[in-house]
Image: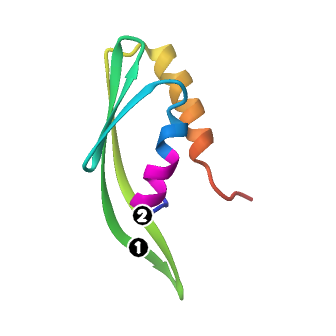
């Protein structure tokens, strides 16, 4: 993800929509239709291109007991919410 941990944490509650979010240190759990999404993240060194520096966050997603169609619908919303900028 191209963001800081602080930005990630400010966006995450809305990115999961109506699902229940439980936050921990460097991790979160999202209850989805009787299953769960487990998230873990760590900050990475910023990417530097010439004089520009871009924050980076490594995020792991692990779905457990979430049907494929439900997972796809969730991720479509999540991805659209997390998009910033554009062109």
Q: Around disc 1, counting alpha carbons within 10 Å, would you say few (fewer than 14), some (14 to 19), or many (20 or more)?
A: some
Q: Residue at x 74, y 59 (%)?
A: 87
The reply to whether dot 1 and dot 2 touch (C-beta < 8 Å) is: yes
| Residue 59 image position (x, y, % from top left) | 36, 48
- Which residue sits furthest right? 87
Q: Position of residue 82 (x, y in %)?
A: 56, 46
Q: Residue furthest bottom?
A: 51
Between 20 and 27, the one nearer to me in the picture? 20
| Highlighted range, magenta | 5-11
Rendering coords of residue 72 (x, y %):
52, 23
For residue 73, side relative to residue 35 (left or right): right
Label 1 or label 2, whichever comes before in sequence order: 1
The local secondary structure at tag 2 comes to strand
Residue shown at 33%/22% (left/top)? 36
Instruction: State the residue at coordinates (36%, 11%).
Output: 34
- Image vertical order of residue 87 relative to residue 31, above or below: below
Checking the image for residue 46, the label placed there is 1
> What residue lies at 43% left-to-right and 63% top-to-bottom?
4
Quarter of the figure with residue 17: top right
Residue hosting label 2:
56
Q: Secondary structure at mark 1?
A: strand
Secondary structure character of the magenta stretch overall: helix
């Amino acid at each position: 993800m191209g963001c800081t941990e602080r930005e990630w944490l400010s966006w995450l509650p809305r990115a999961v929509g109506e699902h229940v979010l439980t936050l921990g240190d460097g991790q979160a759990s999202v209850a989805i239709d009787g299953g769960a999404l487990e998230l873990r993240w760590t900050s990475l060194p910023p990417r530097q291109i010439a004089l520009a520096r871009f924050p980076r966050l490594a995020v792991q997603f692990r779905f457990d007991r979430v049907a494929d169609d439900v997972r796809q619908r969730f991720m479509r919303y999540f991805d659209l919410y997390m998009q910033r900028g554009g062109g």
